[in-house]
Image: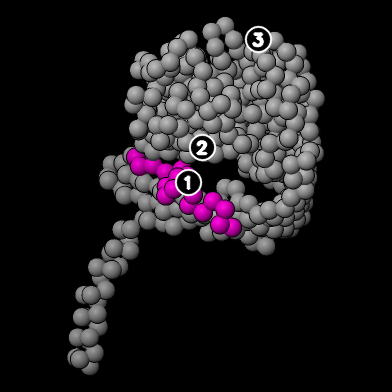
Amino acid sequence: MKRKLLSVAVAGVFASPAIALAQASTVQIYGTVVVNYNVGYKQGANKPNIDMLNSHDANVGIRGEEKLGGGLSAWFQCESTMDVTGNEAFEKGFCARNSGVGFKGAFGNIFYGQWDTPLKMVAAPARIWSTSGAFGSAELLWNGSASNVGNGNAAAETSPGAGDGPIIGAGGAGTQRAGFSRRQANSIFYHSPSWSGFQVLGGYSTLTEGTAGTLGTPVGGTGVDASRKPRLWSLGAMYRNGPLYLGAGYERHTDYNPAAQANGTGVVGGYAGGSDTGYNLAAAYTFAKVFKLSGIYTHIDYDLAAGTSSSRRGFGIYADWQVAGPHRLRAGWTTAGDTKGSAGAGSLATATTCAAATGNVAINSGWCANGGKGDTGADLWAIQYAYAFSKRTELNFGYSSLKNDRLARYAMQTLSRPDTVGQRQHSFVLGVRHSF
């Protein structure tokens, strides 16, 4: 009997440190696996019918928190892409998604890192799909989905495909000048606590490491103007009260020089200044806990050169209905309005790419500015059925259709850019989503 008691005591001595460590540890592993099979159709001679696997919003992450006393905690998060198709698996690097380190308490949450901007975050509760993919709204509402990007700057860079992903500049840093739906790197963020459902968010970008000496090009000349320092400021406010959600966001980019990104020459033009602004309003209401109706309104204004500007409005209406049990229907309409402003007033955008016509300006290749003469908008219609095997596993099937106006060249982000202006795109999507 004594021998048994001694054995139990010895085992307890060795086990107690492990138990204490387990209790003190707050590190968690989490993630989402998303795979979509797309069968797409588009007008034109460049691969009109295609099929592919892709993955949007798939992630795997590690996060942890340490309580420091007095209500103060230190925390970290490292989130990366988890693409089981092999297309982008860790292509954008470790911790390339929402990642940061900071402190939080009664004052709120302040942290450094790479994170979705407040402008993007306040619109998220009104979305029912990713900003990317065949159902994605980023192309029409925010002129591109810019993931893990730094400041736009005057380093030489080429135009993006469908506005998704970073552009690698001469400074060695991923940049994207035009998009307003951003996951911004090298930034400082503040998220306030919730005051009876009301919360404010703020973000400010620092200069991208490695861009010293490539920050700007003086007006009308060549060389480097070190006074040009591209920056981003983003603000957001949101209110939640039961089934009601309201959100508003504002963002400003200085010295981003967006028109140079779409020149197609890979060389920045003579203008490097300017201040580009965007804002969005979002609202959602859930009826009887089963039917969610939501809407998003956006406005973007680019300062392309001295005395030259281009702006555009967009909005989307979405419905998410849990019909019965595991069955769910989602539907949405997203539209981009005609571009306004003085940019591109010299001629209509009738060439293969809207940037090819003299006097026109293309921003992110899909935005065709023609001095406000019209026919530069687009509409995206989408519907999806989903079956939930559990709270963590879903199988879905849907259809989306993108209709460009006569002089527009927007892209369904799965299918890449249309061959010419005015073309349509369609896609059937069979997807699976599993979270852990």
**Tag 3 residue:** 342
User: What's the distance in space between the residues labelled 2 and 3, CA to CA?
Assistant: 28 Å
Q: Residue at x 58, y 38 (%)?
A: 164
Q: Which mark is residue 9?
A: none
Give the image location of residue 211, x and y in percent: 37, 29
The answer to whether the residue labelled 2 contacts the one labelled 1, judged by CB atoms less than 8 Å apart, is yes
Q: Amino acid at mark 1?
A: Lys
Q: Which mark is residue 166?
A: 2
Picture layout, residue 429 above or below residue 412: below
Report helix, strand or loop for mark 3: loop
Precedes in sequence: disc 1 or disc 3: 1
Precedes in sequence: disc 2 or disc 1: 1
> On the picture, is 290 further left or further right than 17?
right
Q: Residue at x 48, y 10 (%)?
A: 220
Q: Amino acid at mark 2?
A: Pro
User: What's the distance in space between the residues labelled 2 and 1, CA to CA?
Assistant: 9 Å
Give the image location of residue 303, x and y in percent: 55, 14
> On the picture, is 122 further left or further right than 413?
left
